[in-house]
Image (cartoon, rainbow, N blue to C red):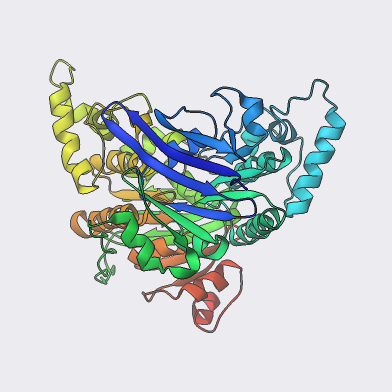
Amino acid sequence: MPPLVQVSGVDKRFGSTHALRSVDLTIEAGQCLGLVGRNGAGKSTLVSILSGLLAPDAGTVSFDGQPAPSVGAVDAWREWIATVFQHSMVVPDLTVAENVFLGSGDRFVSWGEMRTRTRDIMAEWGYDIDARTPCRDLSVEQLQIVEIARSLARGARCVVLDEPTAALERDSVRRLFERVRQLVAGGVAVLYISHHLEEVFEICQDVAVLRDGALVLSAKTSDLTREDLVGAMVGAAPVAEAPAARVQHSSAGTEPVLTIEDLTAASTRGRLSGVSLSVSPGEVVGVTGLLSAGVATLGRVIAGSEPYHGGRISVRGKVVRSGRRDLAQRAGIGYIPEDRRAEGFVAHLGVAENATMTITDRLADRFGWMRPGRRAAAAKPLTDALSLVSSGPAQPVGELSGGNQQKVTVARTLAHEPSLVVAITPTRGVDVASKALLLQSLADVARNTGAGVLLCSDELSDLVLCDRVIVLVRGEVFTEFTDPPFDRDELIVATEGLVSSGNAEEAAR
């Protein structure tokens, strides 16, 4: 009996880039196959071919022994496969229900039935999202939920999940895994793509590794260790080490880089209720909590991307006005946003142009002209330090892999030598080696320049470089950890609003 999905000898080039090299892959009905690899390994290209968006230059794709439909035959592809892409494909001006059933092919629309079915799907997953809500009003987490619900509503026989947990809280991840197991038990094939290797070991029976466009490993997860996967992903190249241990310093008598006093804000990402904190020169302060706790809201408000309604934000003693990103940048605040595609770069502009966007006034000559060579020279030290992979300084950033796009975003932020860097989940969607490089770059900024770093992240592994970690619960400061290295279990307990023996003293302050 033929496999449900079979990829045979698939090859794909984009100019001089050999994205896929004779890839063979099979997914059986009732199998959850993990697909891992570093950014730029070819995962996104393979997903695009499996989704009918790209045609391979060579090789074939078949479903249950039948040749795949021609590229562009959308309805025919949807009978076999549904893809939840890493980057949101939700239409912001449509409602939740309209997005869930977008492209369903029904000639007549019953709005009441569509909303009811959407509510049923959401309730089955334990999500409380109004089917009538416009998607532009949803958080990143809720948009991800809509994407997953849309793929399930189509009843495809194979589901591709591309970084599906990137914006989900732990309870939502648990529900996702339960649903994946139900789908697999019902005979659905699942291709699960993630940089979180612990997820692959938890949910996948088998795993395939892509490196430089080639399939270099295919095995049962039970026969492998994490080190086996990392070794296959990076090959002979060494994995970058985690940031070096922070040298503890005393901030006594030192004026804080950042001071926040009794900050209040309302946002779909979570409210803030009387938050106060400070960051000293050369200090890395982590802020963590559940996605709804206001962690991302805090970062966005400080960076000027969202307004605040009460309280005070000051950088080196100067007040930062509410909701003005331009003024926040002039005040010395660098910003690494959570959604790089929306706020991190301009897709059609080149690597060098994006990386130097915050320092154009320094690079222009006295007539206001910007020489491409000067711009490329200014970008090179930043992109080299981050090991950014591109065909050159002029390559449009929209053509890069997600991890390299994030490196461009970080380079742009660091280029203007900010007094404070606000980073929101800066390692989301990047591979293990790139993650270490990105974290190291933030640690180096604090250590070498004396800038403060505020790291807002629900990725607890990001907090390894922090001097202190502040936990938000329901928009308020719940507790503070001041003695690194921080215990992961205690952090998890604290983010749930509970007090463990290890942080009871901090919570009582």
| Residue beneath the point at 13% across and 19% down | 366
Which x, y percent locates residue 428? 44, 50
Towards the viewer: 396 or 254: 396
Q: In this view, does 338 lie to the left or right of 365?
A: right
Q: Is residue 454 in view from this perspective?
A: yes
Which quarter of the figure has residue 324?
top left
Which x, y percent locates residue 480? 47, 70
| Residue beneath the point at 31% across and 39% down | 408
Q: Is residue 6 left or right of residue 341?
A: right
Tell which residue pokes out farthest to the top in this image.
Answer: 367
Tell which residue pokes out farthest to the bottom in this image.
Answer: 501
Which quarter of the figure has residue 352?
top left
Which x, y percent locates residue 246? 27, 68
| Residue beneath the point at 24% across and 26% down | 394
Circle count: 0
Towards the viewer: 426 or 63: 63
Instruction: Please determine whether, in this image, residue 39 is positioned above or below residue 107.
Output: below
Towards the viewer: 187 or 275: 187
Q: Is residue 163 in view from this perspective?
A: no
Q: Is residue 138 left or right of residue 392?
A: right
Q: Is residue 161 left or right of residue 54?
A: right
Instruction: Please determine whether, in this image, residue 477 is positioned above or below residue 308.
Output: below
Which x, y percent locates residue 48? 49, 34
Towards the viewer: 135 or 6: 6
| Residue beneath the point at 73% across and 40% down | 153
